[in-house]
Every structure is written in C-alpha cells, then in structure tokens.
Image: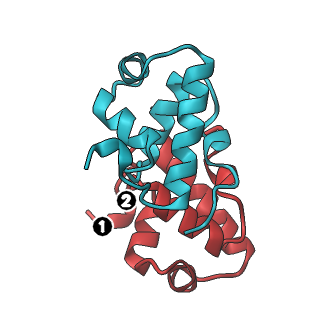
Chain colours: A cyan, B red
Amino acid sequence: MPAASKPPLSPATGEFGKRVRARRETLGLSQEGLAENSELHWSYIGQVERGQVNPTLRNILRIAEALAVDAGELVAKLPSE
Amino acid sequence: MPAASKPPLSPATGEFGKRVRARRETLGLSQEGLAENSELHWSYIGQVERGQVNPTLRNILRIAEALAVDAGELVAKLPSE
C-alpha cells in the first residue's frame, strides 16, 4: 500500500496536516521548501500533511514559523481523539 | 540535582508548562487530578509543567481537554526556539 493512502493517526493529526498543507499551498511553497525553512526532513513534512505522525511541540512551532502563522492557529479547535 | 531545579528544554516548553500549571491551579486541580483527567502519568504532568518535556500534539490535546481550554490557547504565541 503506498504511503499516501494510509489513514491519519487520528482526526486531530489529520486536520492538523490539512491545515499545514493548505497554508503551504497558499504560500506557493513545495514540501521541500517547507522542509528547508523548518529544518525538518521533507519526508516528515509529507507525513505531517497526511496526519501520519504525532508532531511534537517543537516541530509544530518550527512548522508554524516556516509558514509565518502562529502555532495557536494550527492547533486551535482540533477534534479530540 | 533535584528534578525541579532542571531548566526547561526551551523557552517554548517552559512557557507552555507555566500556562498548564496556571490553568490547573485556577481550576483547583492537583497534578494527580490533571493526570487522571488527561489519562497521563502524574510524573509526566510534572515534567510538562517544568518545561522538561517536548509534548506531542496528542498529549497537548489531552491536557487541554482535561483543563477545559482549547489547545490553541495553550500554544498561542509561544516563543520560538
């Protein structure tokens, strides 16, 4: 099964990933560009956007900074598990 | 050196922990009570409040739910690393 078809870990990681992808696309950034700006691996960014990882606070903050949004916006009102 | 005197991992984890502690105290909850409500270990809650762990999104959401606040509030405008 290709990685892209795996389901998200949880509704929360799925929604978080959608927000990251939407913001990245709004900025016209590639996954590689976001990876570089956030000093995270491009494959990790892909997993985040598909909701397949449970990101740490540190990585949430790095991603938010690279997307020029506050981390609070990325995390607000996520569904509980 | 006792655990309580260890410095936070980062300014962000330190500030996050202060917000968790402040909200817990506002609610009149003990660390054990918060641990029980969030289904996390009391020693982990202590580490979170001292900023000594880098919590995952899943645990941030559990803690926020147990404190009856939105996770976005706990994470908003944290200092970058």
Secondary structure state at the residue bearing disc 2 = helix
Q: Nearer the viewer, residue B49 or B67?
A: B67
Q: Which residue is mark 2?
A: B5
Q: Residue at x 41, y 55 (%)?
A: A7
The percent position of residue B37, horizontal first and vertical second, equals: 57, 83
Question: Same chain for marks 2 and 1?
Answer: yes
How many discs appear? 2
**What is the CA distance from the residue labelled 2 to the residue labelled 1?**
6 Å
Query: Does residue B39 show up?
Result: yes
Secondary structure state at the residue bearing disc 1 = loop
* Residue B2 image label: 1
Q: Taking A73 as reference, is B34 left or right?
A: left
Q: Residues within 10 Å of mark 1 (few under 14, many from 20)?
A: few
Q: Taking B25 as reference, is A54 left or right?
A: left
**In contact (CB < 8 Å): disc 2 and disc 1:** yes
Q: Nearer the viewer, residue B60 or B18?
A: B60
Query: Does residue B49 show up?
Result: no
Q: Residue at x 53, y 77 (%)?
A: B38
Disc 2 is attached to a residue of which chain?
B
User: Outermost residue toward the front?
Assistant: A1
For residue A26, above or below residue A14:
above
Q: Nearer the viewer, residue A20 or B64?
A: A20
For residue A2, above or below residue B49:
above
The percent position of residue B71, horizontal first and vertical second, equals: 64, 56
The percent position of residue B67, horizontal first and vertical second, equals: 66, 71
In which quadrant of the rendered view does residue B78 lie?
top right
Disc 1 residue type (three-letter): Pro
The percent position of residue A58, horizontal first and vertical second, equals: 42, 41
In which quadrant of the rendered view does residue A38 lie?
top left
